[in-house]
Image (cartoon, rainbow, N blue to C red):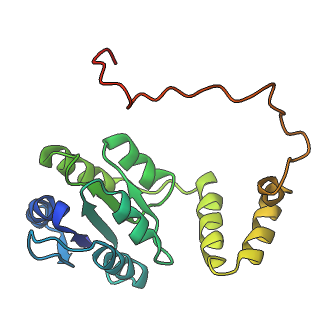
C-alpha cells in the first residue's frame, strides 16, 4: 500500500519510527515532513497528506502531532478526507469499518511506539464494511460539498432531520424545558486534592 505520512515537531520521532515500521512491512511511504525536530506549524504538513489521499496519489495517510487533535482537524479541512484520531485499537478499527477513514491521526506525546505500530497495522488492514455505513459516509461527503454554502448546508441537514437547523435559533417543538437553573458543575481542576 502507498501511504503518505506527515508530522509536526511533536510527532517527528514517532513519524520517523513509523516510516521504518511501514517500510519493513513492504509499504511505500511518502514522507511529507517535517524533516527534523525543530518547531513547525502542523497545518501544511497535515493538509499535504490529506491532498495526497484526496488526489489518489496514496491510498492512506497518517498525520502526527503532540495530541493528534489539530492534525486531524487540519487533514479534515481537505475535501474528500475522513481523518480519525485513533489513540487505541478500537477506534482505529471502527474508523475503518464504519467510517471508511482514509487518514489516521496519532498523538506522538500520547501513544507509545509499540502501541502506535499496532494501531497503524489495524488501520491499514481493516476493511471498510460498507452496507448501512455507506449512506452515512455519503452524507459526510455531501456535508463537505456544502462547506462554503451555509444556506445550502442548512437545507441539506433539514432533509436529513427536519427542523434540525432551527433548533440552534430557538426552542424546538417538543424541547425539554429545564426544571430550574442548571446544576453547578464541579471544577475538578481547581483543587489539588489527590482523591480523584
Above or below residue 122? Residue 160 is below
Which of the image's four quarters has the C terminus?
top left
Asked if one can make out residue 161 in the rendered structure from this viewpoint, the answer is no
Give how far across and how far down residue 45 sits, in percent. Answer: 28, 77
Q: Is residue 98 left or right of residue 62?
A: right
Give how far across and how far down residue 102 sits, in percent. Answer: 40, 66
Image quarter for residue 141? bottom right
**Total number of numbered discs in the rendering:** 0
Image quarter for residue 73? bottom left
Above or below residue 133? Residue 143 is below
Taking the spot 91% from the left edge, 45% from the top edge, the residue there is: 173
Q: Nearer the viewer, residue 114 or 146?
A: 146
Which of the image's four quarters has the N terminus?
bottom left
Q: Nearer the viewer, residue 60 or 112?
A: 112
Taking the spot 28% from the left edge, 65% from the top edge, the residue there is: 62
Give how far across and how far down residue 151 sits, in percent. Answer: 77, 76
Taking the spot 41% from the left edge, 57% from the top edge, the residue there is: 84
Q: Is residue 148 left or right of residue 71?
A: right
Q: Nearer the viewer, residue 119 or 105?
A: 105
Taking the spot 34% from the left edge, 60% from the top edge, the residue there is: 104
Above or below residue 182? Residue 141 is below
Give how far across and how far down residue 113 sits, in percent. Answer: 13, 49
Amino acid at each position: 500500500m502507498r501511504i503518505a505520512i506527515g508530522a509536526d515537531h511533536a510527532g517527528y520521532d514517532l513519524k520517523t519510527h513509523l516510516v521504518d515500521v511501514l517500510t519493513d512491512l513492504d509499504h511505500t511511504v511518502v514522507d511529507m515532513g517535517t524533516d527534523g525536530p525543530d518547531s513547525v506549524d502542523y497545518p501544511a504538513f497535515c493538509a499535504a497528506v490529506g491532498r495526497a489521499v484526496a488526489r489518489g496519489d496514496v491510498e492512506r495517510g497518517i498525520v502526527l502531532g503532540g495530541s493528534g487533535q489539530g492534525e486531524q482537524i487540519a487533514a479534515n479541512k481537505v475535501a474528500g478526507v475522513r481523518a480519525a484520531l485513533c489513540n487505541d485499537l478500537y477506534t482505529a478499527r471502527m474508523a475503518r469499518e464504519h467510517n471508511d477513514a482514509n487518514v489516521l491521526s496519532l498523538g506522538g506525546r500520547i501513544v507509545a511506539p509499540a502501541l502506535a505500530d499496532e494501531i497503524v497495522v489495524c488501520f491499514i488492514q481493516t476493511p471498510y464494511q460498507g452496507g448501512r455505513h455507506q449512506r452515512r459516509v455519503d452524507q459526510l461527503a455531501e456535508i463537505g460539498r456544502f462547506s462554503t454554502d451555509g444556506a445550502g448546508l442548512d437545507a441539506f441537514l433539514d432533509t436529513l432531520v427536519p427542523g434540525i437547523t432551527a433548533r440552534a435559533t430557538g426552542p424546538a417543538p417538543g424541547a425539554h424545558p429545564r426544571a430550574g437553573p442548571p446544576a453547578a458543575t464541579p471544577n475538578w481542576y481547581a483543587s489539588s486534592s489527590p482523591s480523584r
